[in-house]
Image: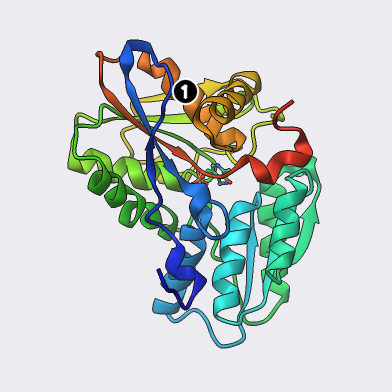
Amino acid sequence: MLIKHIQETIGHTPLFELPIQTPNQVHIFAKLEMFNPGGSIKDRLGEYMLQDAERRGLLTANTTIIEPTAGNTGIGVALAAQARHLPVILVVPEHFSAEKQTLMKALGAKLVNTPSDQGIVGAIKKAEQLAASIPDSFVPMQFNNPANPGTYYHTLGPEITQDLHEPIAAFVAGAGSGGTFAGVAAYLKAEDPHTQVIAVEPEGSILNGGPAHPHRIEGIGVEFIPPFFKHLPIDQTLTISDDAAFEQVRNIAQHAGLFIGSSSGAALAASLQLAQSLPAHSNIVTIFPDSAERYLSENIYD
Ligand code: PMP
């Protein structure tokens, strides 16, 4: 495949039928989003949000793009901004992985760190303050931009049904901003109302009403209910421990030849739990948002 822009390699990732033992011989299919050029599912989002802003006339030739992010959205936004020769400032709580922060800088983004104990809400506030003080700036704001679920409704959802021509008993995906889950869940429910849609969060996230506390799983977990979940018929939310997620990170490296990040491990742990209550040979589709390689400094395989 000859390409002229790295953006041409965003999307159309493989859907992998996992070669692992499952309860009830359920088939688990994982969308391998680490194959995007910036290494995560969020490359789709960066490109889509800037295309959307262009369509709405919100960008000039010099607009500074500012975005609060746990890292992967920052990499995706930095890729999209670089293609348009626009400056980028990414606001990242300081505890997120060093690898992701290095990659954002490598793409030319300027990083502003906020204190870990202020969470993503602290980064959102800081991004808004910066935008107020920088003329001709634009904050895509993944946490309430309808283009976020729109990205996944229009790309990832259709890719799944194009790849798998069989009924999908359940769609299982982690929630951070909630964009991936909301977009794909809405698409799959519209295609087949029998598909159950199952959100995944780490212990320490509040979707199931649990107390908020720090967790090792990176990229998912919410401090507020994502606005995209408002009119979404979510069948169930599964809360996964750090230990259960990291066990699956190791399991998949050993049995499927794949390096997955901890949010992928959580999605797989939830899929295996759900498989226990599904009819034999049902199909589960899940998402592996990124790779273990951007968490090696956090001893992801220990
Ligand atoms: N996994 C990883 C590794 C991520 O970086 C993100 C985005 N923060 C997610 C899952 C969750 O995606 P979303 O924001 O669409 O809920």
Q: Quadrant of ligand 1?
A: top right
The answer to whether residue 48 shows anywhere in this view is no
Crowdedness near tag 1: few (<14), some (14–19) or many (≥20) residues, C-alpha within 10 Å? many
Give me the residue at 68% from left, 68% from top.
Answer: 107
Task: Quadrant for residue 176, please give it.
Answer: top right
Say left or right for 111 vs 201.
Answer: right
User: Depth check: 294 or 124 in front?
Assistant: 294
Identified at 76% across, 33% down, the residue is 299
Q: Is residue 263 found left or right of 134 in the rendered image?
A: left
The amino acid at mark 1 is Ala
The quadrant holding residue 290 is top right
Instruction: Pinpoint residue 58: horizontal percent, then vertical percent.
Output: 49, 79
Q: Can residue 16 be seen?
A: yes
Which residue is under mark 1? 270
- Give SS at disc 1: helix
Residue at figure coordinates x 30%, y 50% from the top left: 159
- Position of 246 with respect to 44 (left or right) is right
